[in-house]
Amino acid sequence: MELSHHLHRIGNDTVAAYLVTTEEGVTVVDAGLPGHWADLVRELEVLGRSLDEVRGVVLTHGDADHIGFAERLRREHGVPVFVHVDDAGRAQGGDKPKTPMGPVRPVALAGFAAYAVRKQAWRNEYLSEVVEVRDGQTLDLPGEPRIVSIPGHSPGSVAVHVPVADAVMVGDALTTKHVLTGRRGLQPAPFTDDPRLALDSLGRLGGLEASWVLPGHGAPWRGELGEVAAEVRRAAG
């Protein structure tokens, strides 16, 4: 799905990943679930690109529904996978704290579970190798993605700011579709390690220049980045 000239989405409002395309190649931001591999290949074919043009995968954090096909790309095509140093262990199968589920609507939860099964969540592979990154780094990848630490959902959660795409990918720092309730609009994401820290971290988005805010779950949002933190706080009550 094309969002703009340099920006494409694979997946849907339940689980999404993003492609940044330039003359230098393709950067993948997040890797969804294993079954999104077919979506990746299909989107690249539509664009007239190939897997050999993927230069790197940048993870917004290390949770299972964001690392999906990353290890396959790394193993079969030699594509490096970048993750913040504080989430490197999580992406490689380390312990993840249990977090309260919060409100749940059975229909929404069933829909999320069914989609996870359809996209082969049971086949998830943790990363064998990662390239650790830190706050403020600009990566030598197509689109020159810049890492902005926004801890809270996980210790190493980051926003990936890509000026050429006029976008910032935020992973689960927020959501526009709550996978457990079906509620839509800017709001906190479930399964967050430190909800208070996650809200505080969103203030860092206000200093970035981008029109698109792209979550891992929910529809792309377009507007003023300076308004995002306040909107999410209001939704949090």
Image: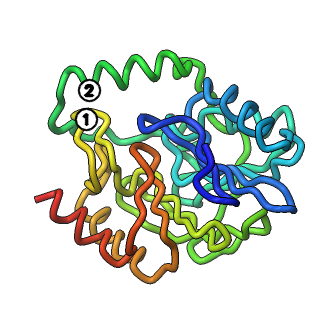
Tally of marks? 2
- Residue at horizontal 63%, vertical 66%? 165
* Tag 1: amino acid: Gly
- The correct choice, above or below, for 49 with respect to 210 in the image is above
The reply to whether discs 2 and 1 touch (Cβ–Cβ < 8 Å) is yes
Q: Is residue 219 visible?
A: yes
Rate crowding at label 2 as few (under 14), some (14 to 19) or many (20 or more) other CA atoms within 10 Å: some
* Location of residue 7 in the rendering, given as x and y in whole percent from the top left corner: 64, 56
The outermost residue toward the bottom is 207
Say how the picture is coloured: rainbow
112 displayed left or right of 27: left
Mark seen at residue 182? 1
* Location of residue 208 in the rendering, given as x and y in whole percent from the top left corner: 49, 79
- Residue at horizontal 73%, vertical 44%? 129
- Residue at horizontal 25%, vertical 62%? 232
* Tag 2: amino acid: Ala
Q: Earlier in the sequence, mark 2 or mark 1?
A: 2
Mark seen at residue 108? 2
Q: State how far apart marks 2 and 1 are (Cα).
A: 5 Å
- Residue at horizontal 41%, vertical 51%? 172
Quadrant of image for the N terminus: top right
* Location of residue 124 in the rendering, given as x and y in whole percent from the top left corner: 59, 26
Q: Give the secondary structure at mark 1.
A: loop
The outermost residue toward the left is 237
Q: Nearer the viewer, residue 110 or 125?
A: 110
* Location of residue 187 in the rendering, given as x and y in whole percent from the top left corner: 26, 54
Rate crowding at label 1 as few (under 14), some (14 to 19) or many (20 or more) other CA atoms within 10 Å: some
Q: Nearer the viewer, residue 86 or 223?
A: 223
- The correct choice, above or below, for 195 with respect to 11 in the image is below
